[in-house]
Amino acid sequence: MSDFSAYMEAKANKREAFAKYNSAGAHLELATIKERAAEFKSQGDPANRISATEGITTRDKMNAAIHYVLWGLLPDSIVHE
């Protein structure tokens, strides 16, 4: 195998490894979101705090639930009530 062929093979291997790395990162992020959604569903506190918050619309309550699932924290508008 020539030096150039070895270089092209190494480059292809790197490209394949990078694709696997990106795929694993996406799978990890999705698994984390699913875990938080299951946590939200199983735990009373986040859902109760959101539903008990007065003065915000249903849409804002839904956004608060989505915020919790994505980031694992209640938004400041709910926490500092």
Image (cartoon, rainbow, N blue to C red):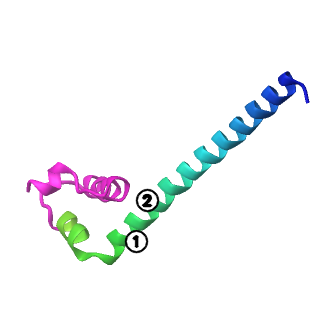
Query: Dot 1 surroundings within 10 Å: few (below 14), some, or many (20 or more)?
Result: few
Work out whether mark 2 precedes mark 1 in sequence or the reverse, and give the earlier one.
Answer: 2
Q: Residue at x 43, y 59 (%)?
A: 33
Is 5 rendered above or below residue 30? above
Q: Quadrant of the C terminus?
A: bottom left
Q: Residue at x 78, y 26 (%)?
A: 7
Q: Residue at x 86, y 27 (%)?
A: 5
Question: Residue 25's mark?
Answer: none
Question: Residue 38's mark?
Answer: 1
**Left or right: where 7 falls relative to 48:** right
Is 1 rendered above or below residue 33? above
Q: CA distance from mark 2 to mark 1?
A: 9 Å
Query: Dot 2 surroundings within 10 Å: few (below 14), some, or many (20 or more)?
Result: some
Which residues are drawn in magenta?
52-81
Q: Which type of secondary structure does the marked residue at label 2 adopt?
A: helix
Q: Amino acid at mark 2?
A: Ile
x and y percentages locating residue 1 in the rendered image: 91, 30
Tell which of 80 and 55 is nearer to you: 80
**Left or right: where 49 falls relative to 71:** left
Q: Main secondary structure of the magenta part?
A: helix
The residue that disc 2 covers is 33
Q: Please check the rendered image and state whether residue 73 is part of the magenta-colored stretch, yes or no.
A: yes
Is 21 rendered above or below residue 48? above
Q: Residue at x 14, y 56 (%)?
A: 79
Tell which of 59 and 24 is nearer to you: 24
x and y percentages locating residue 41 in the rendered image: 35, 73
Q: How many marks?
A: 2
x and y percentages locating residue 46 in the rendered image: 23, 67
Tell which of 45 and 31 is nearer to you: 31
Q: Please check the rendered image and state whether residue 18 is part of the magenta-colored stretch, yes or no.
A: no
Q: Residue furthest left?
A: 81
